[in-house]
Every structure is written in structure tokens, then in C-alpha cells.
Image (tube, helix red, strand yellow):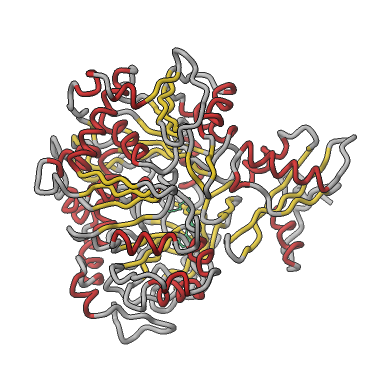
Amino acid sequence: MGQNKLSGDIYYPSKEVIAKANVKDWDELSEKAKKDYPGFWEERASELHWFQKWNKVIDDSNKPFYKWFTGGKTNIAYNCLDVHAKTHRRNKLALLWEGENGEFRAMSYYSLHRETCKFANVLRSMGVKKGDRVTIYMGRTPEIVMAMLACARIGAVHSVVYGGFSVEALHERIEDSQSKVLIVSDGAYQRGKIVPLKEIADEALKRAGGIEHVLVVKRTGQEINMEVGRDMWLHELMALPIANQDYTVEVMDAEDPLFLLYTSGTTGKPKAILHTHGGYMVGTYTTLKYVFDIHEEDRFWCAADPGWITGHSYIVYGPLLNGATSFMYEGAPTHPYPNRWWQMIEKYGLNILYTAPTAIRGLMRFGDAWVNRHDLSSLRLLGSVGEPINPEAWKWYYKVVGKEKCPIMDTWWQTETGMFMITPMPSVPLKPGSGTKPFPGIEMDILDENGTPVADNEEGFLVIKTPWPAMIRTIYGDDDRYVEQYWSKYPGMYLTGDSARRDEDGYFWVIGRVDDVIKVSGYRLGTAEIESALVSHVSVAEAAAIGLPHEIKGNAIYAYVILKAGSQPSEELKDELRLHVGHEVGPIAKPEKIEFVESLPKTRSGKIMRRVLKAKELGVDPGNLSTLEE
Ligand code: PRX
């Protein structure tokens, strides 16, 4: 990138960082990829193992249902484990884990491979076959990684539900995916308490049909209900000879489904984003290698949860495909004290930390002293994801955590993209708050309502103009919604749902969602989910939810509720409603504020005009009100 011509607040990488970088000249790589992006991805794919080579890199004969590496045969779990277990990496640590209660586990590629094979055999013995869906609802322990890889290994499609979700959210996802098997832990440690995952699952299963077997992982050890004939302990089955029988792997077509991951969209229920073995593998492998500059000796820590795409791509698949050591921590960053993260970085000599702005802001609040007590000299790179990072948090992260020597990789991407899309690499000059430019081989733009690219520094709709290997293949069971939601506003282009601007240096600045998605502490929630949880309460007739700026969480949920006739507004009822949303969707969805109202602003066709509510709270002009009902 033309280093001398950039405008604004620029942070240049050091000579040491550039000397080590896998990609030294990003411009050159981008130029090369631009000329022939299928060729660029084909070269990357060649670095992985295929049982049979593809005959076409991209098949775009049925747009927007793109296919990648068609004819190719592979298995992502084989590339994550078997490949390394056969080489010099056999005894290298694949997974390093610390529990919130201080427990510690380290698994080599050899042992993670062996345990995963056994896990896969347990699933096989329960009748799970290629193509079957398996729901996983667990805390952050090594078993969640094994569970995902075991599914992939036998060709089953995993659907991980974040352990912070609750009864109705889990029920909906089990039902929509038609899963036969649920893998759940008895509980998870969070902030010194036990989250009773099995108990929540039991309640969800009372509402959902279809689950034949529940495989229970022992973590917290409290007394739980085990339903005879349905529920089985993983450790008991893993001890049976059948678990050890056969370590074969299912040969998968590049386009065979790998996982479903539910995420919130603009309307209605959460939708299942479908990713496949081949393209997702190539995308996550390449982006992690280039952006977080993975080297043989690296210990990489992605502090997300495996229940979200960040954890799928960059705790599990990306690091293992690269043969790196992936670190995972079970609990809360501030337990028992706000130095927990810094303590672990020092203790394990972690080299790369990848987290979310909300966590950075949350830790920044406790001051520098907690960080400065620890030797963080092992850190080489930092990362950010999930929402725009404010320059103040960026600078604190850079100075206090990274000691002004670790570039920050601000990666913009989505559940749907599967991999980083707008992101720097270590050798790129940074501007706090900008993810810099699209990854090589990816073309993106910012358009106005009519599809014309906006001028520099003007805000518009962020779109992706080239297909990419880890792209969403469809919304599971709803091809029409896939086309409608992502490809219909601007034909031939993928609509991200975000607004952005581009500065005079070509740097992208993502502003935020332009639809009814609210990012709370980096978690993605739909207004519809919160509203339907509220309406499921006996006292509520109608509800509207919006996101308003919040210092730590990025956005906080505000809810407006119309009560049913006969229900009386009270502070107690507000508390009850907050708890109800927590019980149905999960603690992250609890509204910050609830207001009882007599009516809601609606269009003549009955749609709630959330922007009017938002404008009123913020004391700004609500804009065009011509469609308002009254
Ligand atoms: O609004 C963007 C925001 O997160 C959305 C995607 O959310 P999700 O599918 O849950 O995936 C999050 C983790 C990949 C985007 O549409 N977002 C994600 N990363 C950034 C971001 N906004 C600004 N800067 C980022 N680095």
C-alpha cells in the first residue's frame, strides 16, 4: 500500500512485523488475485489434502447458488487432524484449554485425532449417518471441538447453538434443523456459577420433537436428569470397545454440507446459514494464515465462543487446518479478577489475541494496572471482530495490551461470509476503526439506493461483487429467502446488510447494520426474536425492540410494550418481562430498558417503524414520515 500518501491517523507496521509476515506485499498479492481470482483460490486449495482433485474451481451456472471446487473430494476434519497426526506435528499441541475453575488440558494432534475418532464412532453407534443433522449445545470445553470435528468426520451436519441461548432459542433451532441427536454438557462454568445447560435442554426437548438420543458430556458434575433410553453419558460410551473400532473418515464432496449456523436476519425466525466442506475449508485456512500470519510455533487465541461463526472459523477450523495451537478459555474475562486474560497470555505465552470491541471496552474500564501486572511480551498480533471498534478502544488495545508493537487486525465479516472479507494483514498501515481493504480476490463496493457507487467518504450499502469460497450456499430449507435477502436488491451482488463509507485512500469504514439486526456486545440478535419472546408472555399484546448506542455493549436493547387489557404496568412486571426474555432467548437478549406504551408507530401496512422509536429516544429528526399510519 502506498505508504507515504495516506491521510489521517496512521499506524505503520514495524520492520520486525514485516520481516516475519507471510504476505509482505499486500498490493502485489491483491493485484495478482484481481486478475484471476479463481486461480488465486485454486493455488490456496492446492495446499490442502483432497482425496480427488476438483475439475472446476467455480461453477456459476446457477447463480447465486455458486459451487466451489466441484468434483473435488475431501473432508475438512481429515485436513484438521489426520493430516497433521501423520507428520512432525503429531506431538504438537492442537488444543490448549483452561477452565474457568483453573483446570487445564492440553491435547496434541495425535490425541485430539484419536479422541475425535472415538467420538465419531460413538455417534455412528447412535445411528448418525452422512447428511444427518446433530445439534450441539455446550460450554467452551475441548469436547465441543471434538463434537464438531466428529460430526464433520462422519459427514454429519453440525448445528451448534450458543450456550448463552436459552429454551425457546434452542427449541427453534433443534426443530428447524430436524436434528436426531443432541450433544449437550451437564453445565458450563460462567462467572463462578453453573449454567445448567442440560436442564435448559430438557425444557427445550419438551417443546421439540425429533431428537432420538441425547449425548451428555460431564463438565460441572451436578445432579441432572437422565432420561432412560434417550440420554447417555459420553464418557461411558467412549470407554466401550465400539468407540475404538474404526478410524475411517467419510469422503465428502466439496459441496456436501458441513454445518448449519443459525443467525438473526431482518424478519421472523433465525435462519440457518449453510456452509460446505470444500470452499469453507479453503477460505478459513487461507484467511487465518495470511491475516493472523500463522507460523509453526504460534499459539493463537480466538476468545470468541465456538457457538458463533468466529469460533467455528477461528477457534476450530482455521487454526487446526493450519496445524497451529489453538487456545480456548471457558469462562468470563473478569473471573475472578479483571486480569484473568492477561494472566493466561503470560502463563501460556500466547502470541495472538483475537477478540471483540465490547470485550476490549469492558476490560479497559478496569484501568491499565491489571494489564501492566503481566508480561505480555509473547504477543505479536491482535485482532478485533464483531462490530466497529471505536478509536479510543483501538488505541488502548494497541498501547496498553500490544505495547505499540502489535498491529491490530480489524476483521469485518459475517456468519454468511464464513471468513474474513475486509481486513488488514500485518504488513499493512492501519487507521484505527477501519478494517482497511477487502481480502485479495474479493471485490467490494459501496452503493447508493440506485446501485451507483457513492463518492469517497459518503455512506452507502456495502456489497460484495465477487463470489468467494467460504460463502453461504443457501439458507437451509429456504432457497427463496436466500435469493431474496442477499441477492435481490442489486442483481448479481451480495447485500451485506451493513452501511459503510470508503475514504480517499480506499480504506473501508463499516458503520453498522441498516436492517433490523441489533449487535449487542458483538452478538447478533433480531428485533423479531426479542419481540416474539415478549409477546409470548401472558401480559403482552404487542412489542417493538430497537438498539440504542451503549458505551460497553455497542448497542443496548430498548423495548416498547403494549399490555393486554387487564394487565397493569408496574416495575415488577418490567423485571418479569426481562427475565422472561432471558429464559426464552438468552441473557444477552434481555432489554436494557422496557417502556409501556399505548400504541406503536406503524406504516399503513402494519409494519412497526423502528426508526421512529429510535429517533425519538435519540432526540433526532425521524426523517420521512409519509408512510406513518397516523
Ligand atoms: O455488522 C457487521 C458486524 O457484524 C455483522 C455480522 O455478524 P455475525 O454474522 O454475527 O458475525 C460476526 C463475526 C464475524 C456484520 O454484518 N461486524 C463484524 N465484524 C465487524 C463488524 N462491524 C464492523 N467492524 C468489524 N470488524
Look at the image and tell me in which quarter the N terminus lies.
bottom left
User: Is residue 343 found left or right of 580 in the rendered image?
Assistant: left
Q: Nearer the viewer, residue 353 or 14?
A: 353
User: Is residue 434 found left or right of 170 in the rendered image?
Assistant: left
Q: Residue at x 34, y 86 (%)?
A: 5
Q: Nearer the viewer, residue 81 or 129?
A: 81
Task: Count all numbered tags in the image, as a single digit.
Answer: 0
Quadrant hosting residue 72: top left
Q: Residue at x 28, y 27 (%)?
A: 120
Quadrant hosting residue 180: top left
Relative to 213, does residue 191 appear above or below in the rendering?
below
Furthest-bottom residue in this view: 4
Relative to 14, does residue 49 appear above or below in the rendering?
above
Q: Is residue 423 visible?
A: yes
Q: Residue at x 47, y 47 (%)?
A: 486
User: Is residue 267 found left or right of 472 in the rendered image?
Assistant: right
In the rendered image, residue 508, in percent from the top left (x then y), is placed at 43, 69
In the rendered image, residue 270, in percent from the top left (x then y), is placed at 54, 39
Q: Is residue 70 visible?
A: no
In the rendered image, residue 420, in percent from the top left (x then y), is placed at 35, 57
Q: Nearer the viewer, residue 239 or 34?
A: 239
